[in-house]
Amino acid sequence: MKTSYESLIQEMRSGRLSRRQNMILKKAREMNQPFTARLMLRWLRFSDPNAVRPRITELCDAGQLVVTGTTRCSVTNKSVSVFRARTEEEYQAFLAEIASDENLTQSELPL
């Protein structure tokens, strides 16, 4: 049975992102500022939080987004994570770290 980490490595090797993941990553890079899931929800004009929250988690797991801190949600008053998109250089460094941990070559990593 595969572990979550092994599944993550396999998904990263594929280099594929879902349509919704691509939308979120593109908007995060376009806006070029830290954001919460609720802010991303507004930017993309979605009404259901489940349209973005799971995809943000997946993008964090894949190394495309990083958590930069927490803030209080103005709607719920709960503590929520603040995210930002990694730069291409940061993402390549992340992939290199994964490769060294797994003894992978550069050609085995996603583009």
Image (cartoon, helix red, strand yellow):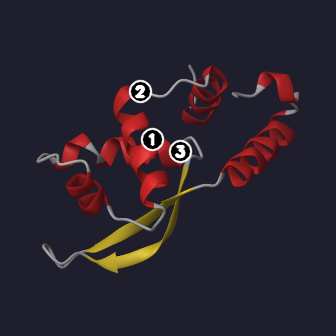
Determine whether 60 is above or below 103 in the image: below
Please name the residue that numbered disc 1 is placed on. Answer: 58
Mark 2 neighbour density, 10 Å: few (under 14) some (14–19) many (20 or more): few
Residue at 64 percent of width and 54 percent of height? 87
Determine whether 85 is above or below 26 in the image: below
Determine whether 49 is above or below 95 in the image: below
Residue at 26 percent of width and 55 percent of height? 43
Please identify the quadrant where the N terminus is shown: top right
* Viewer-nearest residue: 105 or 21: 21
Where in the figure is residue 30, as x and y percent of width and height? Answer: 45, 53
Please name the residue that numbered disc 3 is placed on. Answer: 61
Please name the residue that numbered disc 2 is placed on. Answer: 18
Check residue 82 in the rendering and tell me which mark sits there, or answer none. Answer: none
Where in the figure is residue 98, as x and y percent of width and height? Answer: 76, 41
Answer yes or no: do the residues labelled 2 and 1 have beta carbons within 8 Å? Answer: yes
Alpha carbon distance from label 1 to label 3: 5 Å
Q: Secondary structure at mark 1?
A: helix
Where in the figure is residue 24, as x and y percent of width and height? Answer: 38, 44
Please identify the quadrant where the C terminus is shown: top right
